[in-house]
Image (tube, coloured by chain):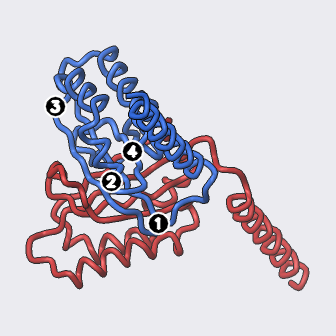
Chain colours: A red, B blue
Amino acid sequence: MVRNFLCVAAVAILLSGCTNAHKTERIAGEKPARVLRHVVLFKFKDGTTDQQIKAVENGMSALPGKIDAIYDYEWGTNVSPENLSEGFTHCFVITFLSEADRATYLPHPAHMEFGKTFGRYVDKVLVIDYWTKQ
Amino acid sequence: MVRNFLCVAAVAILLSGCTNAHKTERIAGEKPARVLRHVVLFKFKDGTTDQQIKAVENGMSALPGKIDAIYDYEWGTNVSPENLSEGFTHCFVITFLSEADRATYLPHPAHMEFGKTFGRYVDKVLVIDYWTKQ
Protein backbone atom coordinates (compact mmCIF):
# COMPACT_ATOMS: atom_id res chain seq x y z
CA MET A 1 0.00 0.00 0.00
CA VAL A 2 2.73 2.42 1.06
CA ARG A 3 4.82 1.32 -1.92
CA ASN A 4 1.90 2.03 -4.24
CA PHE A 5 1.44 5.45 -2.72
CA LEU A 6 5.13 6.24 -3.04
CA CYS A 7 5.03 5.05 -6.64
CA VAL A 8 2.03 7.26 -7.47
CA ALA A 9 3.67 10.19 -5.69
CA ALA A 10 6.90 9.66 -7.63
CA VAL A 11 5.04 9.58 -10.94
CA ALA A 12 3.11 12.71 -9.96
CA ILE A 13 6.35 14.53 -9.12
CA LEU A 14 7.91 13.40 -12.39
CA LEU A 15 4.89 14.53 -14.39
CA SER A 16 4.86 17.82 -12.54
CA GLY A 17 8.53 18.23 -13.45
CA CYS A 18 7.75 17.55 -17.10
CA THR A 19 4.93 20.11 -17.13
CA ASN A 20 7.15 22.73 -15.56
CA ALA A 21 9.95 21.96 -18.00
CA HIS A 22 7.46 22.37 -20.86
CA LYS A 23 6.29 25.71 -19.51
CA THR A 24 9.86 26.91 -18.96
CA GLU A 25 10.75 25.90 -22.48
CA ARG A 26 7.84 27.95 -23.80
CA ILE A 27 8.83 31.01 -21.83
CA ALA A 28 12.61 30.81 -22.24
CA GLY A 29 12.67 29.35 -25.76
CA GLU A 30 13.08 31.28 -28.95
CA LYS A 31 10.09 32.60 -30.87
CA PRO A 32 8.59 29.69 -32.80
CA ALA A 33 8.98 29.78 -36.58
CA ARG A 34 5.22 29.72 -37.00
CA VAL A 35 2.19 29.61 -34.76
CA LEU A 36 -1.47 28.72 -35.16
CA ARG A 37 -3.75 31.75 -34.80
CA HIS A 38 -7.36 31.31 -33.76
CA VAL A 39 -9.14 34.55 -34.69
CA VAL A 40 -12.61 35.00 -33.19
CA LEU A 41 -14.91 37.91 -34.05
CA PHE A 42 -18.00 38.75 -32.00
CA LYS A 43 -21.04 40.82 -32.91
CA PHE A 44 -23.23 41.36 -29.87
CA LYS A 45 -27.00 41.21 -29.84
CA ASP A 46 -28.85 44.52 -29.80
CA GLY A 47 -29.56 45.52 -26.24
CA THR A 48 -26.45 43.90 -24.75
CA THR A 49 -25.29 46.29 -22.05
CA ASP A 50 -21.79 47.65 -21.61
CA GLN A 51 -21.58 45.70 -18.35
CA GLN A 52 -22.49 42.44 -20.09
CA ILE A 53 -19.94 43.10 -22.84
CA LYS A 54 -17.31 43.84 -20.19
CA ALA A 55 -18.13 40.50 -18.55
CA VAL A 56 -17.61 38.72 -21.89
CA GLU A 57 -14.26 40.49 -22.40
CA ASN A 58 -13.16 39.52 -18.89
CA GLY A 59 -14.41 35.97 -19.35
CA MET A 60 -12.42 35.50 -22.55
CA SER A 61 -9.33 37.18 -21.10
CA ALA A 62 -9.43 34.79 -18.12
CA LEU A 63 -9.10 31.73 -20.37
CA PRO A 64 -5.29 31.91 -20.88
CA GLY A 65 -4.91 31.63 -17.09
CA LYS A 66 -7.12 28.55 -17.05
CA ILE A 67 -5.99 26.71 -20.18
CA ASP A 68 -2.30 25.92 -20.44
CA ALA A 69 -2.63 25.01 -24.12
CA ILE A 70 -2.96 28.74 -24.97
CA TYR A 71 0.46 30.04 -25.98
CA ASP A 72 -0.46 33.69 -26.48
CA TYR A 73 -3.53 35.91 -26.37
CA GLU A 74 -4.57 39.40 -27.38
CA TRP A 75 -7.78 41.16 -28.18
CA GLY A 76 -9.28 44.54 -28.96
CA THR A 77 -12.31 46.41 -30.18
CA ASN A 78 -12.87 47.72 -33.65
CA VAL A 79 -11.34 51.11 -34.49
CA SER A 80 -11.33 50.77 -38.27
CA PRO A 81 -12.42 53.86 -40.20
CA GLU A 82 -13.36 51.71 -43.23
CA ASN A 83 -16.79 50.52 -42.08
CA LEU A 84 -16.14 46.99 -43.34
CA SER A 85 -16.51 45.08 -40.06
CA GLU A 86 -20.04 43.80 -40.81
CA GLY A 87 -21.17 44.64 -37.28
CA PHE A 88 -18.35 42.71 -35.59
CA THR A 89 -16.97 44.82 -32.76
CA HIS A 90 -14.57 42.48 -30.95
CA CYS A 91 -11.55 40.54 -32.19
CA PHE A 92 -9.93 37.92 -29.94
CA VAL A 93 -6.76 36.23 -31.15
CA ILE A 94 -5.74 33.05 -29.34
CA THR A 95 -2.43 31.55 -30.37
CA PHE A 96 -1.43 27.89 -30.19
CA LEU A 97 1.81 26.08 -30.91
CA SER A 98 0.09 23.04 -32.37
CA GLU A 99 -3.20 21.62 -33.58
CA ALA A 100 -3.08 19.36 -30.53
CA ASP A 101 -3.13 22.43 -28.27
CA ARG A 102 -6.13 23.78 -30.19
CA ALA A 103 -7.79 20.39 -29.81
CA THR A 104 -7.24 20.69 -26.06
CA TYR A 105 -8.66 24.22 -25.99
CA LEU A 106 -11.85 23.80 -28.02
CA PRO A 107 -13.62 21.27 -25.73
CA HIS A 108 -11.85 22.45 -22.54
CA PRO A 109 -14.29 22.82 -19.61
CA ALA A 110 -13.27 26.46 -19.07
CA HIS A 111 -13.96 27.23 -22.74
CA MET A 112 -17.27 25.35 -22.64
CA GLU A 113 -18.25 27.24 -19.49
CA PHE A 114 -17.42 30.54 -21.21
CA GLY A 115 -19.71 29.62 -24.12
CA LYS A 116 -22.51 28.53 -21.80
CA THR A 117 -22.30 31.72 -19.73
CA PHE A 118 -21.85 34.31 -22.45
CA GLY A 119 -23.16 32.77 -25.67
CA ARG A 120 -26.56 34.36 -25.12
CA TYR A 121 -25.13 37.86 -25.68
CA VAL A 122 -23.50 37.01 -29.01
CA ASP A 123 -25.45 37.60 -32.21
CA LYS A 124 -22.76 36.40 -34.63
CA VAL A 125 -19.40 34.72 -34.27
CA LEU A 126 -16.85 34.33 -37.03
CA VAL A 127 -13.80 32.11 -36.62
CA ILE A 128 -10.80 31.78 -38.88
CA ASP A 129 -7.65 29.89 -37.91
CA TYR A 130 -4.37 30.06 -39.79
CA TRP A 131 -0.75 29.02 -39.56
CA THR A 132 1.30 32.18 -39.76
CA LYS A 133 3.27 33.01 -42.88
CA GLN A 134 5.27 36.19 -43.45
CA MET B 1 19.67 79.88 -57.04
CA VAL B 2 22.64 77.91 -55.76
CA ARG B 3 21.74 78.90 -52.23
CA ASN B 4 18.17 77.65 -52.76
CA PHE B 5 19.48 74.39 -54.14
CA LEU B 6 21.83 73.94 -51.20
CA CYS B 7 19.01 74.71 -48.81
CA VAL B 8 16.72 72.13 -50.42
CA ALA B 9 19.55 69.59 -50.46
CA ALA B 10 20.26 70.23 -46.78
CA VAL B 11 16.61 69.77 -45.88
CA ALA B 12 16.47 66.57 -47.95
CA ILE B 13 19.53 65.19 -46.16
CA LEU B 14 18.07 66.13 -42.78
CA LEU B 15 14.75 64.47 -43.63
CA SER B 16 16.55 61.41 -44.92
CA GLY B 17 18.47 61.26 -41.64
CA CYS B 18 15.21 61.47 -39.68
CA THR B 19 13.68 58.64 -41.70
CA ASN B 20 16.69 56.44 -41.17
CA ALA B 21 16.73 57.20 -37.46
CA HIS B 22 13.05 56.27 -37.32
CA LYS B 23 13.71 52.96 -39.08
CA THR B 24 16.68 52.17 -36.80
CA GLU B 25 14.56 52.93 -33.77
CA ARG B 26 11.90 50.50 -35.00
CA ILE B 27 14.38 47.71 -35.56
CA ALA B 28 16.56 48.19 -32.50
CA GLY B 29 13.83 49.30 -30.10
CA GLU B 30 11.98 47.15 -27.61
CA LYS B 31 8.65 45.53 -28.44
CA PRO B 32 6.01 48.27 -28.27
CA ALA B 33 3.52 48.08 -25.40
CA ARG B 34 0.65 47.92 -27.86
CA VAL B 35 0.20 47.93 -31.59
CA LEU B 36 -2.62 48.60 -34.03
CA ARG B 37 -3.74 45.45 -35.86
CA HIS B 38 -5.45 45.72 -39.22
CA VAL B 39 -7.18 42.37 -39.82
CA VAL B 40 -8.39 41.77 -43.36
CA LEU B 41 -10.43 38.72 -44.38
CA PHE B 42 -10.99 37.74 -48.03
CA LYS B 43 -13.60 35.50 -49.57
CA PHE B 44 -12.84 34.90 -53.24
CA LYS B 45 -15.40 34.85 -56.03
CA ASP B 46 -16.43 31.44 -57.32
CA GLY B 47 -14.25 30.50 -60.26
CA THR B 48 -11.15 32.32 -59.03
CA THR B 49 -8.26 30.07 -59.97
CA ASP B 50 -5.47 28.91 -57.66
CA GLN B 51 -3.06 30.94 -59.78
CA GLN B 52 -5.13 34.12 -59.33
CA ILE B 53 -5.37 33.53 -55.58
CA LYS B 54 -1.60 33.00 -55.44
CA ALA B 55 -1.14 36.33 -57.24
CA VAL B 56 -3.33 38.04 -54.63
CA GLU B 57 -1.32 36.46 -51.79
CA ASN B 58 1.93 37.55 -53.41
CA GLY B 59 0.55 41.03 -54.09
CA MET B 60 -0.46 41.53 -50.48
CA SER B 61 2.78 40.06 -49.16
CA ALA B 62 4.77 42.51 -51.31
CA LEU B 63 3.18 45.54 -49.61
CA PRO B 64 5.40 45.55 -46.48
CA GLY B 65 8.41 45.94 -48.78
CA LYS B 66 6.78 48.90 -50.50
CA ILE B 67 5.14 50.71 -47.59
CA ASP B 68 7.42 51.72 -44.73
CA ALA B 69 4.43 52.50 -42.49
CA ILE B 70 3.82 48.75 -42.06
CA TYR B 71 5.47 47.62 -38.84
CA ASP B 72 4.69 43.92 -39.08
CA TYR B 73 2.80 41.53 -41.34
CA GLU B 74 1.55 37.97 -41.34
CA TRP B 75 -1.12 35.98 -43.09
CA GLY B 76 -2.52 32.53 -43.58
CA THR B 77 -5.37 30.45 -44.93
CA ASN B 78 -8.22 29.03 -42.93
CA VAL B 79 -7.61 25.72 -41.16
CA SER B 80 -10.38 25.98 -38.58
CA PRO B 81 -12.35 22.78 -37.99
CA GLU B 82 -15.33 24.80 -36.67
CA ASN B 83 -16.88 25.82 -39.99
CA LEU B 84 -17.56 29.36 -38.73
CA SER B 85 -15.53 31.33 -41.28
CA GLU B 86 -18.54 32.39 -43.39
CA GLY B 87 -16.68 31.58 -46.59
CA PHE B 88 -13.64 33.70 -45.73
CA THR B 89 -10.51 31.72 -46.59
CA HIS B 90 -7.68 34.25 -46.15
CA CYS B 91 -6.64 36.31 -43.14
CA PHE B 92 -4.05 39.08 -43.55
CA VAL B 93 -2.87 40.91 -40.44
CA ILE B 94 -1.03 44.18 -41.01
CA THR B 95 0.39 45.84 -37.92
CA PHE B 96 0.98 49.55 -37.40
CA LEU B 97 2.56 51.52 -34.59
CA SER B 98 0.16 54.42 -34.92
CA GLU B 99 -3.04 55.64 -36.53
CA ALA B 100 -0.84 57.97 -38.58
CA ASP B 101 0.93 54.95 -40.08
CA ARG B 102 -2.43 53.39 -40.94
CA ALA B 103 -3.46 56.70 -42.50
CA THR B 104 -0.32 56.52 -44.64
CA TYR B 105 -1.04 52.92 -45.64
CA LEU B 106 -4.73 53.12 -46.60
CA PRO B 107 -4.38 55.60 -49.52
CA HIS B 108 -0.78 54.59 -50.37
CA PRO B 109 -0.27 54.16 -54.14
CA ALA B 110 1.01 50.59 -53.67
CA HIS B 111 -2.10 49.69 -51.66
CA MET B 112 -4.37 51.40 -54.20
CA GLU B 113 -2.63 49.52 -57.01
CA PHE B 114 -3.15 46.24 -55.16
CA GLY B 115 -6.88 46.94 -54.87
CA LYS B 116 -7.15 47.95 -58.53
CA THR B 117 -5.31 44.82 -59.71
CA PHE B 118 -6.86 42.20 -57.47
CA GLY B 119 -10.19 43.58 -56.26
CA ARG B 120 -12.00 41.83 -59.11
CA TYR B 121 -11.26 38.41 -57.57
CA VAL B 122 -12.63 39.25 -54.14
CA ASP B 123 -16.27 38.49 -53.36
CA LYS B 124 -16.27 39.76 -49.77
CA VAL B 125 -13.82 41.65 -47.61
CA LEU B 126 -14.13 42.11 -43.87
CA VAL B 127 -11.88 44.50 -41.98
CA ILE B 128 -11.51 44.95 -38.24
CA ASP B 129 -8.76 47.03 -36.64
CA TYR B 130 -7.91 46.99 -32.95
CA TRP B 131 -5.33 48.25 -30.49
CA THR B 132 -3.91 45.18 -28.77
CA LYS B 133 -4.80 44.40 -25.17
CA GLN B 134 -3.69 41.29 -23.24
> How far apart are labels 4 and 2 at the CA level?
14 Å
* Up/down of A11 relative to A69, above or below: below
Above or below: residue B106 compared with residue A116 = above
- Distance between the alpha carbons at the discs numbered 1 and 3: 35 Å
Residue B54: x and y in percent read 37, 20
Q: Which amino acid type is shown beneath numbered disc 1?
A: His
Q: Can you name the residue that lies furthest to the right here?
A: A3
Q: Chain of mark 2?
A: B
Q: What amino acid type should be assigned to the residue bearing mark 2?
A: Ala
| Alpha-carbon span between mark 2 and mark 1 | 41 Å
User: With B19 as the anchor, is A13 left or right in this view?
Assistant: right
Q: Check disc 4 and report the residue beneath it.
A: B94
Q: Nearer the viewer, residue B59 or B41?
A: B59
Q: Which residue is mark 2?
A: B100
Q: How far apart, in angstroms, are the residues tagged by discs 4 and 3? A: 20 Å
- Residue A40 lies, in percent from the top left, at 33, 56
Judging by the rendered image, the residue that carries numbered circle 1 is: A108
Return the chain for callout 3: B
Which chain is indicated by disc 1?
Answer: A
Label 3 neighbour load within 10 Å: few <14, some 14-19, many 20+: some
Q: Earlier in the sequence, mark 2 or mark 3?
A: 2
Q: Circle 2: is it few (<14), some (14-19), or many (20+) Cα within 10 Å?
A: few
Q: Nearer the viewer, residue A74 or A79?
A: A79
Dot 1 alpha-carbon crowd within 10 angstroms: few under 14, some 14 to 19, many 20 or more: some
Q: Residues within 10 Å of mark 4 (few under 14, many from 20)?
A: many
Residue B123: numbered disc: 3
Residue A86 badge: none
Q: Residue at x 45, y 49 (%)?
A: A37
The answer to which of A5 and A58 lies nearer the viewer is A58
Check whether the beta carbons of the residues at disc 4 and disc 2 lie within 8 A of each other.
Answer: no
Tell me where residue A90 appears, x and y as whole percent.
27, 63
